[in-house]
Amino acid sequence: MTTSRNKSTTTYPQQAILEAYREARTRMPNFSIHALAKTMQLSHGHVQAARLGSGVTGLALTPCDMVMRLPSLGALEISTVSSHAHMLSKTEQLQIAGQDSNNLSLRMLLPHWYWACMSHDEQHKIEIFDRYGRLLHCISNSPELPLGKGWQRLEKLAIDRPPAFTELVDVVHESTAPKQRGWDALVAGWRSVTNESEVSHLLKKHHLRRVDAYKALENRFTQRMSSRCFVSTLERAAKANSPIRLRIANAGAVHQHSGLFGHVGERHQKIEIAGEKAMLAIDREAIAETWLVTLPCKEGVTTRLEAFSKDGRFISGLSEAIHQPMPVSTMNAMSVYG
């Protein structure tokens, strides 16, 4: 296990960050806060915190209160950001504890939500950060539809108290494999899982990262595919006009969207997968491993593809929009995903 520290904001006073933001916004043709933060070796949250009182306000809301107010905001564009990907979904109205009409699913992990702010740079926008200042979600109004009444209520909850972000220490885990006794228990546990929550619980029980569990279960419940397989499967689904379910995750949520994604292409060093109501962008060189994963069910198995970076971080998942169980055969599954 190795560690590395990110540069602390103590090097930059708030005024210096604010001035750098103003200068970059004036001079950079394709300005983005993400690019500015990367150049200054800061988090996105540190830049926005420096702008408090200058186009940005904090929100005096608990994570639970924030979630409960989302349906009142009307039509939304919701973006979830991870290390190597981001997904944008559009919805006319978000529903709590229900299935969205656009096949949007957000499983919120509220303990990781630390600070939320609201800005009005181009659209009404809420940004949610973890305690390290990393952007988890960006929620903005849909420019094509009327503004929801909830936005005005949020403005009354503005607060200019700056967040106390913590310095991030990146921990890079070396690949580990369970010993024989632990492997037997992992196999037995995998046979009994029925949903993603049970998978997460099983991995936590065995102290395994997802990619390490897949390596341990290779040729039984998982199969290593080519790194190109993930993108080629997306291209085939787009060409065949087949509905699929895409998934990304970060510390704050698991974001899934089902539907038709008719375009797969490259733009600005990204692989973009676009549909009518959602878009997924992945760093072009990020995918180092792709795994075909089978999960047991009463009728046989369901399958999905998952892509990982070279340091074992989950990038994105891909499955059929409507799960169609197959006989228990990895080769049958491979015939679908290539």
Image (cartoon, rainbow, N blue to C red):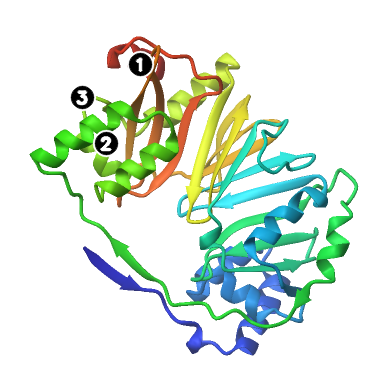
Residue 149 or residue 259, whichever sits in front: 149
What residue occupies the far left of the structure in this picture?
180
Percent across and percent down for residue 248 are 50, 43
Residue at point 68%, 48% (across, down): 78
What's the amino acid at mark 3?
Asn
What's the amino acid at mark 1?
Ala
SS of the residue under disc 3: loop
Earlier sequence position, callout 3 versus callout 1:
3
Give left or right: position of 28 versus 280: right
Residue 47 or residue 115, whichever sits in front: 115
Question: In this figure, which residue is indicated by the disc labeled 2?
Answer: 214
| Residue 193: quarter of image | top left
Within 10 Å of disc 2 (Cα), the crowding (few <14, some 14-19, many 20+) is: many
Percent across and percent down for residue 171 are 30, 64
Quarter that holds the N terminus: bottom left
- Whether residue 70 appears in this view of the structure is yes
Give left or right: position of 175 versus 294: left
Residue 252 is labelled as none
SS of the residue under disc 2: helix
Percent across and percent down for residue 263 are 61, 28
Question: In this figure, which residue is indicated by the disc labeled 3?
Answer: 219
| Residue 157: quarter of image | bottom right
- Whether residue 285 appears in this view of the structure is no
How far, Cα to Cα, is label 3 from label 1? Answer: 12 Å
Residue 333 is labelled as 1
Earlier sequence position, callout 2 versus callout 3:
2
